[in-house]
Amino acid sequence: MRIGFGYDSHVFDPERPCILGGVVIPDSPGLRGFSDGDAVAHAVTDALLGAACLGDIGTHFPPGQDAWRGADSMDLLGRAMGLVREAGYRVGNVDVTVICESPRIGPVAAEMRARLAEVLGVAHGDVSVKGKTNERMGWEGEGKGLAVHAVALLRTSST
């Protein structure tokens, strides 16, 4: 078994749609980023790549390259999952925590879990998504953006 940790954060951008875990969240500002800004997908991607010792999201999908401008981050996650499989691993489980005052994560957590599970090729019960506020402390608490932490457990394909 191998464990990887991922982190991502973005500031809000009211000119973009809010996409988290592949789910469009209406009535919420989006996230600034080179791709679609999906911080959940980015953190999970880094957790998977880290667990497999395959670098990070920027190594495989460098910001600044036109190929990744506005990219669907769930597509990037799927590509990273392909690399993880090629390295001989499969996902055991993934746990995600989104830190923000808004949007509320609880009402869309099940949909995010389903989208992530689909892309990762695992059961819905192997993915956890939860939201936490920062009790109005720091930049997340001031509503300037959000942060995401993700942990992934990988197993060798033979187990």
Image (tube, helix red, strand yellow):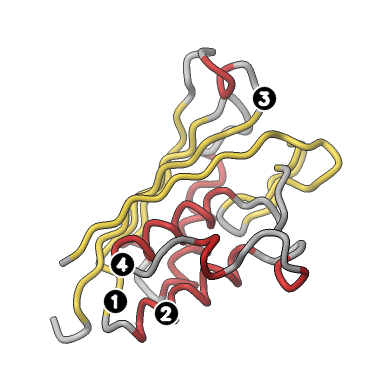
Q: Secondary structure at mark 3?
A: loop
Contact, mark 4 vs mark 1 (Cβ under 8 Å)? no
Residue 59 rendering spot, x and y as whole percentages: 51, 65
In the rendering, which numbered label is found on residue 90?
1
Give the answer, above or below, for where 45 lies relative to 149. Answer: below
Nearest to viewer (mark 4 / mark 2): 4
Residue 77 rendering spot, x and y as whole percentages: 52, 68
Between discs 4 and 1, the one toward the N terminus: 4
What amino acid does circle 4 point to? Cys
For the view shown, which residue lies furthest in the right direction?
15
What residue would you read off at disc 3?
A: 144
In this picture, residue 71 sits left or right of residue 60: right
Q: Quadrant of residue 27?
A: top right
What amino acid does circle 3 point to? Lys
Crowdedness near tag 2: few (<14), some (14–19) or many (≥20) residues, C-alpha within 10 Å:
some
Q: Mark 2 to mark 1: distance in Å? A: 10 Å
Q: Mark 4 to mark 2: distance in Å? A: 11 Å
Between discs 3 and 4, the one toward the N terminus: 4
Q: Secondary structure at mark 1?
A: strand
Q: Observer-nearest residue: 7 or 108?
A: 7
What residue would you read off at disc 4?
A: 53
Q: Observer-nearest residue: 122 or 14?
A: 14
What amino acid does circle 2 point to? Leu
Q: Mark 3 to mark 4: distance in Å? A: 32 Å
**Residue displayed at 75% across by 43% down:** 26
What residue would you read off at disc 2?
A: 83
Between discs 2 and 3, the one toward the N terminus: 2
